[in-house]
Image (cartoon, helix red, strand yellow):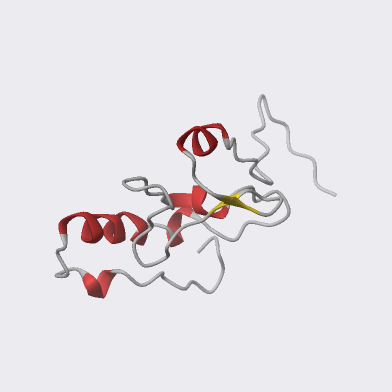
Amino acid sequence: PTAVEADRVVLMTGYRQDPTLFRQLGVELEGERLVPRVDEETMRTNVPGVYVCGTAVAGTQASGVEVYIETSHVHTRRIIRDITGDDSADADLETPVYALPES
């Protein structure tokens, strides 16, 4: 093993989502990971006018990260399209695929 001296370390090996706001709003949460129920095409939840984007769409990711910042940029474009009805950016709505998730 290699030892590296450091003043501080930020351990980011998982993500435990705080579901409080989702519950207050009435967003349906699924499974033990508390994944918000979201329409992947629009990012809408079951609550009218409430959308979810970014890594929050995956709920708690403590046992392996599936959604990364890099793969969730499309969420905002999907939401904007749904709100405005503007389909002009449809080509940019596909989730990017990377060789490695951290690419």
Q: Is residue 37 left or right of residue 15?
A: left
Image height of 103 relative to 51, above or below: below
Q: Is residue 70 left or right of residue 81?
A: right
The residue positioned 19% from the left and 68% from the top of the image is 89
x and y, in percent, of residue 94 in the image: 36, 72
Q: Depth check: give the residue in front, 3 or 58.
A: 58
| Number of numbered callouts drawn | 0
Residue 11, given in percent of the width and then of the height, sits at 68, 38
Give the residue displayed 49% in from the left and 45% down from the top.
27
How far across and down, in percent of the image, does residue 101 sit?
55, 64
Q: Residue at x 21, y 54 (%)?
A: 83
Of 48 and 94, nearer the camera is 48
Residue at point 41%, 51% (across, down): 53
x and y, in percent, of residue 91 in the image: 24, 75
Whether residue 38 is situated above or below residue 95 in the rendered picture? above
Q: Nearer the viewer, residue 25 or 56?
A: 25
Q: Is residue 74 left or right of residue 9?
A: left
Q: Residue lying at the far top in this picture: please name it.
A: 7
